[in-house]
Amino acid sequence: MRPVWDQLERPGSGARVWKASRRRFVSNVLGPHFEQICRDWSLHHADPDLFGGLPARAGHGVVHDPKARTGHEVDVAVIGIADGGKPPLLAIGEAKWNDTMGVAHIERLRHIRDLIAKSGRYDTTDTRVVCFSGTGFNDAALAQGAASPGVHLIGLPALYGRS
């Protein structure tokens, strides 16, 4: 609220301030909070069969792409229990609170999974791709999710136990 504090002190300016601040609030507060909900759900509430194993931890991070000279943010990374070898990367995911997700999100995660596989840090043999959305998925993404056993689309009903 700091950038608009002076405006908030004026009586009756709340609606105008909210209109100007809503986008920043969604991206800086709701988005990160939804990402954390998705990580917590993955670790504590998801059926382990969804990921092909029991998660040991769930986090987030950046995967570097040396060829493109960029980094790719991963909102949800689900890591399994390492039985003496490399820890299995059970799933990587993208979480979008306010965007309808499509095939481009799935393809992006597949690319990131390939980059992680090349790094050799995790066992990515059975890594699943998971898209979390607060608003849903377009028809192409729904078709891709239905056709690909390693792709999972998680909406609000599943996150809140009504799947």
Image: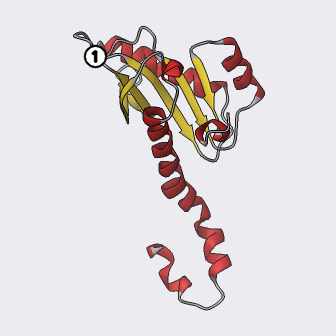
- When the figure is inspected, residue 120 is found, relative to residue 13, above or below; the finding is above
Identify the residue position indicated by label 1 in the image.
82
Task: Give the residue displayed 42% in from the left and 8% down from the top.
Answer: 125
> Is residue 74 visible to the viewer in this orientation of the structure?
no
- When the figure is inspected, residue 91 is found, relative to residue 42, above or below; the finding is above
Name, please, the residue furthest toward the right.
Answer: 139
Q: Nearer the viewer, residue 117 or 40?
A: 40
Answer with left or right where residue 36 lies relative to residue 16.
left
Give the position of the C terminus as an image quadrant. top right
How far across and how far down the image is residue 91, in percent? 46, 22
Task: Give the residue displayed 62% in from the left and 69% down from the top.
Answer: 20
> Is residue 135 visible to the viewer in this orientation of the structure?
yes
How far across and how far down the image is residue 17, in percent? 61, 76
The disc labelled 1 sits on which kind of residue? Ala
Name, please, the residue furthest toward the bottom.
Answer: 11
Task: Give the residue displayed 49% in from the left and 51% down from the top.
Answer: 33
Q: Nearer the viewer, residue 21 or 41?
A: 41
